[in-house]
Structure formats: C-alpha cells, structure tokens
Amino acid sequence: MLRDPLARIPSTLLGEFYAHQLRHRRRFLLLINVLGQLAFLTYGWADQLVIADQALASWILRVGYVAMMVVPTYLVFYRLQNVLLMDVLLPVSIVGAAGIWFWLLAQSTDPHTAVYQYASLIFIVLANLGIQVSFVAALMLSVGISLVVGVGVLNVTKANMHDVLIFTLVYYPVFFFSLFISWSNTVSRRKEFAQAMLNEQAKRSLEASNRVLDQLAHTDALTGLDNRRQFEKLVRYELARSARTHQPACMMLFDIDHFKQINDTRGHDVGDLALKSMAEVARMQIREQDAIARYGGDEFAVLLTNTSLEAAMVVAERVRRSIEVCTLQLPTGDTLRMTTSIGVVGFGPTTRRLEDLVSLADRALYLAKKGGRNQVVRQDEPETVT
C-alpha cells in the first residue's frame, strides 16, 4: 500500500482501516464539527453589521440550525460510532448552512451583499478541511456545496453575468485547492494506516522472534527440555519459596547407566537417540507443574514442588521402572535397552543454597552407581556427606 501513489486499501482491510480511523481521527472530526458550527453561529455578528436588515432573521436561523445539528452530532459521534458518517457530517451541514446564508443575502437590500457573498469561500474550504477518510465523499459534497453557492450567487447578483463571472474566477481556484487539501488528507490517512499495519506486523514478528530466542536461551536443543541455566533458576526460586512457606520440595538427578559404552560401541547418533528417549519417558512420569532439565551430558534433573521425600522416592522409582522397561528401536533395526541410576534429595533447613542441594543429589546418584546402578538412592542428611 505504501508503494501505491494512491495508497489504496484492499477491500479485505477496509474494516480495519475504518476502525483505525475511528480510534485516531474521531477527536479531530468532533472538534472540527464543533468549531464549524460555532463559526457559522458567530457569523451572525457579521450579518448584524453587513446586512443589518436581516440581523434578527440571521440570529434565529443560525441559532436554530446549530441547535438542530446537536442531535445528529451526538448520535453520530456517541451512538453510531461510524467514522464515515463522522467524516461527512460537517460538509453535509455546510450544504444547509450555505443555503441559509445565501437566502439571508437574497432577502437583504443592503448594497454590500455583492461583496459579502465572497465570504462563502469559507464553506468549501471548511468542508474539505473536515473530510479525512473518503475523498469520493469530499468530491460529491463539494459539488453539492458549489451548486448551492452558485444558485445563491445568481440570486444575490440578480443573474448579472459580469458579477457571476468575477465570483466564479475567485471561487473555483479555492474550490480546486480545497479539494487538493482533502485529497492529500485522505491519502495521508491511508498511508498512516498502511504504516501502522507494517509497524504492528514488525512488532509481532519481533515479539515472535524474541519468544523463540527466549525459548532457545533456556531450552536444550536435543531433548527440548529446560537447560541447566533455566533449571537452576527454577530451583533457586523454589528454594526461596520453600523457605518462606515451609512447603516440601525435592530434587532428582539421574543419568543413563553405561552411557559412554553406548556412544563408543553404537556411535553418537544412537547416544543422542538414547538421550531423547530417556527425556521423553521421564517427562511423562512427572507432573506438569514440575520441572525437568538436561543438566549436562547424559545427566538429567527434576524439580518436584510440594513433594515430600517419600513421595519423591515413589516418583523416582516410577521413572526408573519406565526407563528400564522401555525398548528403543534403532534405525538399523536393532533395539536398545537402558537403565538409569537416580539420586533424590529433599529441601531442608541445611539445603538453602543451590550448590548444597546439587551436591547432595550428586552424592545420592554416586551411591546409586556404586551400589550397582539401576536403582534409586535418597540423601537424607547433609552431615553424612564426606
């Protein structure tokens, strides 16, 4: 749209275009409507000076007309909320205002009416200044206002072609200039909308990119689990919450038994498949509110919130058993069976730091390995660590 000199709006976006204009142009359109009506009303003072014989009629008609316009103005701006109607309300009212004013001039016997009629130029200028959305409406209403003005000039000049010609020479440059202003306004509104659409699209694209980058920043690329950095952030938060609320929580550390042997004999591709399989099986055994992460190499960690050490042992055993019975189908047609060793530790008064908690869990995992692997070991007291 921005490359189009006319900045044409596709039909599919017209609804959004009008909604955008309603949000951004309603206040301006209301203000210029109010100012236009006030200008028409205050011209009564000029009528009182120039066409004094029609002063009373002028005030009656002007006050009555402005009062009559209060209702449609209120309905359009506060009830209907239609920006197209807001756009044309002032020019439509100017058609009536021009008719009233030229009727007053035609009724006056003051010799200055021939000069005073040139003040009607304000009608066409104000009408096209007010239109911001639809140039077609500006063109049609400008023609309508010009017809009213033309008929009024014929009446005031008694169809004197010399006076009519002079008025026309003055009026039509203003007519085309005001139309150009309206054209520029409406094209600017379209370009503003197109730019706003591009800005919004760029904003959404940036937000999506930031979400992806944020996801990559705390996610392990191979398994899709949280990475170590993210997991430690969650553990620190849970440590603080547990200390404050005295709610139990536990941590598990586990890895694949004899993982180095799998890599050495079957290759790193199979090793990666083993890690992905273990991650998927383990994730299915914990609750949604718990956190699981690839802690490093073939080591995984789980944070169990609102969970006692006894309950954590049940979860750990479920994880161990699920991995033990899982059979991994390899691309070569072979199968791979795995086991895991798990160390479990509970949050407590002596485990207020992440480092203490990890050290205890790692100690429990070491004891599970030392005890023959494929088992779960809990670490109860920090004092037992040597």
Image (spheres, helix red, strand yellow):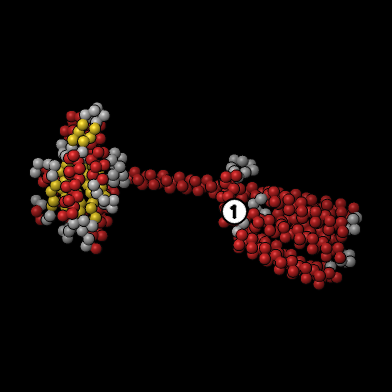
Q: Residues within 10 Å of mark 1 (few under 14, many from 20)?
A: many
Q: Is residue 316 above or below residue 244?
A: above
- Is 323 in front, or is 211? 323
Q: Residue at x 57, y 46 (%)?
A: 13
Q: Is residue 191 above or below residue 118?
A: above
Q: Position of residue 180 (x, y in %)?
A: 71, 49
Location of residue 382 by image quarter:
bottom left
Report the number of numbered marks: 1
Q: Position of residue 300 (x, y in %)?
A: 22, 44
Q: Is residue 58 above or below residue 202?
A: below
The amino acid at mark 1 is: Gln
Residue 213 appears left or right of 21: left
- Is 326 in front, or is 28? 326
Looking at the image, which residue sits at the far front?
A: 325
Q: In which quadrant of the rendered image does the N terminus lie?
A: top right
Residue 239 seen in this snapshot: no
Residue 128 seen in this snapshot: yes
Please give the residue where the numbered disc 1 appears in the rendered image.
Answer: 21
Q: Position of residue 114 (x, y in %)?
A: 86, 60
Residue 181 appears left or right of 114: left
Task: Report helix, strand or loop for mark 1.
Answer: helix
Looking at the image, which residue sits at the far top?
A: 332
Q: Residue at x 68, y 56 (%)?
A: 88
Residue 321 appears left or right of 24: left
Q: Residue at x 20, y 43 (%)?
A: 322
Location of residue 160 by image quarter:
bottom right
Q: Residue at x 19, y 41 (%)?
A: 323
Looking at the image, which residue sits at the far bottom?
A: 56
Q: Position of residue 101 (x, y in %)?
A: 80, 63
